[in-house]
């Protein structure tokens, strides 16, 4: 494996593909297990242990065929705390890494969960597959179309099992509802709306730059992102409100809402995408991404013309999706 942290080097090789594959990791991996024994355990490593990563690992370990064996985080305090928790719950101490590449060098790790900030997904996913690991990667898959195409190309090259954290697709009630729509059970669909009220969102108060907390490898946290001084607003959790690392609430939750609308309407690649927005809800907030404040602060419009039709549900051939961070609407205009 290369020691380079340069994401751009990953993206300039002419990598291209159309869409990412998403399959249930445990089921798919069971079919391609290295040793072939029904008694084999899938040995899982976690990259990014603080929030969703820990939730993902906890959920995955409910499967009888999964064993957590390694943790990786650039925050030594978080890593030590999660290591102790895992030892207490599983009865065995996991191997701890501050550099995800050293975890990928560990031949005993079969699959990894990637739950780092979004700007790391492309490089870590490609590195994991090149190391022979299967992957569960948190959503959103990437921060750009180029990143996503690079990841799909790596999936095709290394032929690993990959699942992206669009977890609604794994819930039976969503699958049943979408199957009902596809069967024509509700007739012709004229308009679809979905929304999520984020009552926990508040203004992010500006804070001065400062030294990274003890035990934090900040250079490794930045990785392929722009070099800048440490600021607590751009670190744990709230990094998602800054363009260097993520896309705000639209990519944090909008990705879930729009995915279900697109899946339900059997939508393919659109003809055009446009958006507008601004920091209208909290104009003096330290957030860079648009703030989720009624009536709306971001409007994204995605259009199809003549390329989308569901014979069973009678979906029109021209359509538009309009989405807000706390409100998403799918409307086939007639």
Image: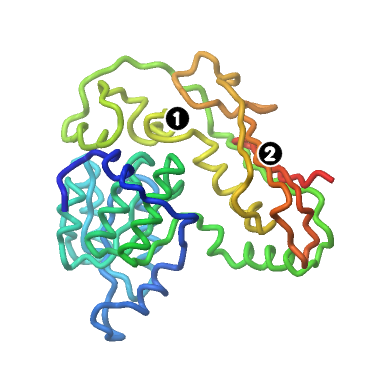
Residue 327: image quadrant is top right
Read off the residue under disc 1.
241
Q: Secondary structure at mark 1?
A: helix
- Left/right placement of residue 75 relative to residue 118 reads left
Disc 2: CA contacts within 10 A as few (<14), some (14-19) or many (>=20): many
Looking at the image, residue 125 lies above or below residue 110: above
Q: Position of residue 89 (x, y in %)?
A: 28, 62
| Closer to the eye: label 1 or 2 | 2
Q: Nearer the viewer, residue 132 or 282?
A: 132
Q: Position of residue 272 (x, y in %)?
A: 62, 40
Circle number at residue 31: none
Separation (CA) of disc 1 from disc 2: 21 Å
For the point 74% across and 46% down, which residue is it?
319
For the point 17% across and 31% down, which residue is it?
214
Q: Position of residue 112 (x, y in %)?
A: 29, 59
For the point 25% across and 50% down, which residue is it?
82
Looking at the image, residue 124 lies above or below residue 65: above
For the point 70% across and 27% down, which residue is it?
295
Read off the residue under disc 2.
322
């Amino acid at each position: 494996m290369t020691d380079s942290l340069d994401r751009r080097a990953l993206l300039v090789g002419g990598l291209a593909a159309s869409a990412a594959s998403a399959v249930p990791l445990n089921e798919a991996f069971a079919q391609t297990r290295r040793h072939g024994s029904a008694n084999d355990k899938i040995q899982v490593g976690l990259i990014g242990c603080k929030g969703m990563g820990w939730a993902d690992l906890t959920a995955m370990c409910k499967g009888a065929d999964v064993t957590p064996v390694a943790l990786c985080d650039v925050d030594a305090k978080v890593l030590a705390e999660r290591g102790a928790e895992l030892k207490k719950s599983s009865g065995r101490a996991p191997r701890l890494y501050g550099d995800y590449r050293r975890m990928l060098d560990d031949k005993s790790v079969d699959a990894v969960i990637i739950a780092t900030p979004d700007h790391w997904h492309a490089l870590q996913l490609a590195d994991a597959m090149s190391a022979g690991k299967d992957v569960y990667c948190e959503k959103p898959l990437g921060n750009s179309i180029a990143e996503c195409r690079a990841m799909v190309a790596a999936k095709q090259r290394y032929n690993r099992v990959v699942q992206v954290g669009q977890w609604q697709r794994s819930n039976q009630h969503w699958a049943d509802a979408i199957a009902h729509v596809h069967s024509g059970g509700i007739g012709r669909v004229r308009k679809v709306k979905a929304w999520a009220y984020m009552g926990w969102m508040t203004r992010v108060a500006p804070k001065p730059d400062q030294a990274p907390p003890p035990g934090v490898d900040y250079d490794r946290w930045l990785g392929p992102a722009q070099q800048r001084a440490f600021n607590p607003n751009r670190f744990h959790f709230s990094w998602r409100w800054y363009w260097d690392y993520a896309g705000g609430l639209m990519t944090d939750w909008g990705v879930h809402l729009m995915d279900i609308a697109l899946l339900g309407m059997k939508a393919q690649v659109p003809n055009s995408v446009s958006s507008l927005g601004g920091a209208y809800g909290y104009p003096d907030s330290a957030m860079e991404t648009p703030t989720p404040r009624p009536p709306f602060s971001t409007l994204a419009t995605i259009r199809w013309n003549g390329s989308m039709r569901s014979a069973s549900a009678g979906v029109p051939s021209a359509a538009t999706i309009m989405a807000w961070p706390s409100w998403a609407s799918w409307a086939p205009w007639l």
